[in-house]
């Protein structure tokens, strides 16, 4: 991993840290999310206004989903919220999580559910 730039080793402490190649991949992901936010913004506003409901876009990362962009509808007051990948939830929660699960193959679902605990997030979780 060190040879390809994924990690670098501090010679004094002998600890490993993220290398330039790994940081490049992480940065690229956020840049792609920014492009997705820009491209999807107007369409999400239209969908939110048409459906009179909160709408959003999430991305699957392992057993989690990351909220990339959300347009919230609250009663007659519209509030736009733009998240920058900072809201992470288990993949099995929420409508967007169910959509992401529906895109997975059976073998992927088997591996996923054999390796996670289905924990309730609140007192009314089903």
Image: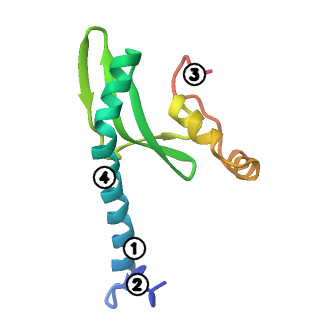
Q: Element type at marker 2?
A: loop
Q: Residue at horizontal 27%, vertical 31%?
A: 81
State if disc 2 and disc 1 touch (CB < 8 Å): yes
In the rendered structure, which disc, 4 or 3, sits on the residue that comes first in sequence? 4
Alpha carbon separation for disc pair 1 and 2: 7 Å
Packing grade of label 3 (10 A; few <14, some 14-19, many >=20) is few
In the rendered structure, which disc, 3 or 1, sits on the residue that comes first in sequence? 1
Q: How is the image coloured?
A: rainbow
Q: Element type at marker 3?
A: loop
The reply to whether residue 19 is visible in this rendering is no
Name the quadrant containing residue 69: top left
The reply to whether residue 27 is visible in this rendering is yes
Foreground label between 3 and 1: 1
Q: Quadrant of the C terminus?
A: top right
Q: Which residue is mark 3?
A: 125
In the rendered structure, which disc, 2 or 3, sits on the residue that comes first in sequence? 2
Q: Which residue is mark 4?
A: 35
In the rendered structure, which disc, 2 or 4, sits on the residue that comes first in sequence? 2
Q: Residue at horizontal 35%, vertical 31%?
A: 44
Foreground label between 2 and 4: 4
Alpha carbon separation for disc pair 2 and 3: 43 Å
Q: Residue at horizontal 37%, vertical 14%?
A: 52
């Amino acid at each position: 991993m060190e040879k390809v730039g994924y990690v670098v080793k501090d010679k004094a402490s002998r600890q490993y840290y993220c290398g330039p190649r790994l940081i490049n991949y992480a940065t690229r992901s956020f840049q792609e999310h920014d492009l997705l936010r820009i491209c999807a913004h107007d369409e999400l506003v239209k969908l939110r206004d048409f459906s009179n409901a909160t709408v959003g876009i999430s991305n699957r990362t392992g057993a989690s989903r990351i909220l990339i962009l959300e347009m919230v509808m609250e009663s007659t007051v519209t509030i736009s919220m733009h998240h920058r990948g900072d809201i992470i939830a288990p993949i099995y929660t929420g409508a967007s999580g169910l959509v992401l699960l529906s895109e997975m193959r059976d073998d992927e679902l088997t591996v996923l559910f054999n390796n996670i605990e289905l924990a309730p997030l609140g007192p009314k979780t089903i």
